[in-house]
Amino acid sequence: MTVRKYKLIIAYDGTGYEGWQARSNGRGIRQTITGACEQLLGSAPEIIASSRTDAGVHARGLVAHLELTDGHPLFTGAQLRLALNAQLPAEIRILSAARARADFNARFDAITKEYRYQVWNHPVMAPLLRHQAWHIPRPLDLAVMREAAAYLTGRHDFRAFTAKRKGELLDSTRTLHTCQIKRSGARLTFHLIGEGFLYKMCRRIVGTLVQVGEGKLTPAEVKSLLHPPTEHQAGMIAPAHGLILWKVRY
Amino acid sequence: MTVRKYKLIIAYDGTGYEGWQARSNGRGIRQTITGACEQLLGSAPEIIASSRTDAGVHARGLVAHLELTDGHPLFTGAQLRLALNAQLPAEIRILSAARARADFNARFDAITKEYRYQVWNHPVMAPLLRHQAWHIPRPLDLAVMREAAAYLTGRHDFRAFTAKRKGELLDSTRTLHTCQIKRSGARLTFHLIGEGFLYKMCRRIVGTLVQVGEGKLTPAEVKSLLHPPTEHQAGMIAPAHGLILWKVRY
């Protein structure tokens, strides 16, 4: 049996979806793509993703892989992309599909992941951004937020910046290469690049930095959450709809 | 009787609305704001807008005015904004409300209007922009588009760039101060600033320039549509959902 592996880059509007992987028979991104494959191929290949985004989180560049075998058409990458997009709803798009080496693994080969988080910092929310940005009506002090962000950059035990999840957390040390905040008018964009993120880590970093900007936490208090690391003690978890999985590098 | 006039700056996501002014009892932006006023004030003041956007068109800075009288609460601008936003759906936001001079007229006092139009120029549409940008899958030649845009800038008879509407077109001469196209990755943004626009003029300019970029029209052909002016002869009318009424200056 010959096996052909494909690497997919996927973008989606996570609004109204239960995340990459829905529980039971909910509306998940992965289930929807699996359904499109089934329509197209008559069978549903397993789709392995770089990341499992939560309900409401968006993606501009999630990476996944799947394998086709002898029974399937001999698609080129471009053909597979076109055929899948024809089956998928407009909220989900295959940006590219390409043949990959047999040993490529979208989940385990990722070197860095980049997330972006959008905040709309204005007394009134922008209607066109309401599903893609978190609305913070009161002014934020960007200087102290950046001071706190600098403490988070680097290799640390981030156990304070995750959330409870079933099963034990074996290793909560991660390297955060970039934690920058850019402002363009009322829009703040958080750029987070790391070698991997704990469960809800991005949203907890953003929520904590916003609380710093509101004067509810100091940069020194943020620093102290890392040394010594304290479990689930950081600031609030920012809402899902402001987060976009931006890019995965291999 | 004392009359207090207010100037409103309004933003909306036009998706699913029949435009600023809906026919009969459809779902219009103006009707929705009038309904919110009625909830708040017990009566519905007349709302006069700078522009009447078409179905599906968005706004970031439409300006309108309304008058309150003795029977109404003595709202400050900030109070009126808060109270109206509390009644309105999330698609429509009053960005600001302020007391205005008695003779201020949102429609007739406008000096320039700025529209922006977004095109996503990539083989695959970006899901998060699907209600706010026109998808053009094939590459566009920006250099010839800009050449054609330069011909359109200035004071011209734009009758080729409008659409049929009931009633005669008395004067189709307008001044287009700015007609620029900016590119950021796959996103093209058209910036159109003028002292006033004919019916569907923005969308017909964008549609025509996109056809130039696709090689279906030449810049010289665009120029010839202005000299001598020819009725409704220009290129296609770009779809509504890429257009945003950006700013009105007084």
Image: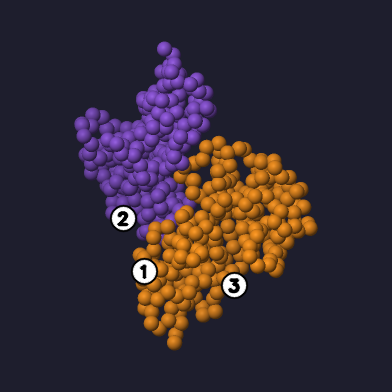
Chain colours: A purple, B orange
Query: Label 2 lies in what chain?
Result: A
* Figure check: B112 above or below A26: below
Do labels 1 and 3 touch, CB within 8 Å? no
- Residue in the picture at 46% in, 34% down: A87
Callout 1 amino acid:
Ala
Query: Label 1 lies in what chain?
Result: B
Please name whichever residue, A239 or A78, is drawn nearer the observer in this view of the structure: A78
Name the residue beneath numbered marker 3.
B108
- Residue in the picture at 41% in, 21% down: A67
Q: Is residue B2 left or right of residue B169?
A: left
- Give residue B113's quadrant in the image: bottom right
Please name whichever residue, B127 or A148, is drawn nearer the observer in this view of the structure: B127
- Other residues around mark 2 within 10 Å, as few (<14) / some (14–19) / many (≥20): some
Task: Name the secondary structure under disc 1.
Answer: helix
Where is the C terminus of chain A found, in terms of image quarters?
Answer: top left
Q: Looking at the picture, how far across and down is residue B3, in whole percent?
A: 46, 82
Q: Looking at the picture, how far across and down is residue A5, in whole percent?
A: 44, 21
Task: Name the secondary structure under disc 2.
Answer: loop
Task: Give the mark, 1 or 3, whose residue is nearer the N terminus.
Answer: 1
Mark carried by residue A117: none
Q: Are marks 2 and 1 on the same chain?
A: no
- Residue in the picture at 50% in, 20% down: A74
CA separation in Å, label 2 and label 3: 45 Å
Callout 2 amino acid:
Gly
CA separation in Å, label 1 and label 3: 27 Å
